[in-house]
Image (cartoon, rainbow, N blue to C red):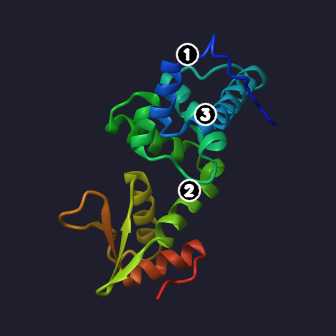
Amino acid sequence: MDITFQIDDDEFEQNQKELIKKTLKIEDAEIQEALSKIGKASLTEYLTMLVEGGMPSRADEAKQDRLLYLIESYFCDSLPTESQISTIFQLTQSQSKTLLKNTVSRFRNKLDEVLANTMKSVLGDAEHSNQIFLVVISSDVVKDELNMLITQNEPTFKPITKRKGSAGQYEISEDSHALLCRVLGLNDVE
């Protein structure tokens, strides 16, 4: 499905464009494509409502549905961070974490590939240093999912832990890193 919009300056004022650019962290040249992707998410939401029996009865479910459609249409191959969700949905960091966690849980089958791609991306950027791997993880939900994989497959292995003195850098033991690479189908980084 190809959704496009013609942005008319009469209907879309400069201050609105600036807010969109700030919220989505994009440049002028990216506005058209971003709005088309968001439009596709919106249309998918409405089509689902029309075809599959209406809107969810709970506000939380409606937010989860909306986030699912944005992940599928706008974010595509990776999960958004809690910070991105906070900005787009105008929620607190804690509310965003809960929304992302509940959305991943509720739509696990639909988001399985996106979640795996996100975890692979984190592991792919790992740097080996002094018998540990250092990674930047921008989402608590992704960290929790990686730790769940460790616990499910080798409960005696060390979980991912925050590096002292760092805002978003984490340490992964060599054995846990090798396990995660194996489980996610990545070649182990030496």
Residue 106: % across, % down: 55, 42
Q: Give the residue drawn at x 72%, y 21%.
A: 53
Q: Give the residue drawn at x 37%, y 53%.
A: 140
* 36 is higher (above) or lower (below) than 144: above
Q: Give the residue drawn at x 44%, y 47%.
A: 81
Determine the secondary structure under disc 3. helix
Q: Is 144 situated left or right of 48 in this image? A: left
Residue at which label 1 appears: 13
Determine the secondary structure under disc 2. helix
Disc 1 crowd rating (10 Å Cα; few below 14, some 14-19, many 20+) is: few
Q: Amino acid at mark 2?
A: Leu
Q: Amino acid at mark 1?
A: Glu
Quarter of the rendering containing residue 40: top right
* 55 is higher (above) or lower (below) than 181: above
Residue 118: % across, % down: 53, 59
- The one nearer the camera, 87 or 55, is 87
Determine the secondary structure under disc 1. loop
Residue 135: % across, % down: 38, 69
Quadrant housing the N terminus: top right
Residue 181: % across, % down: 52, 77
- The one nearer the camera, 126 or 32, is 32
If you read the primary sequence from the N terminus, does the residue marked by circle 2 or circle 3 appear first? 3
Gap between marks 3 and 1 measured at Cα: 13 Å
Q: Amino acid at mark 3?
A: Ile
Gap between marks 1 and 2 measured at Cα: 36 Å
Quarter of the rendering containing residue 171: bottom left
Marks 2, 3: nearer the viewer: 3
Residue at which label 3 appears: 31
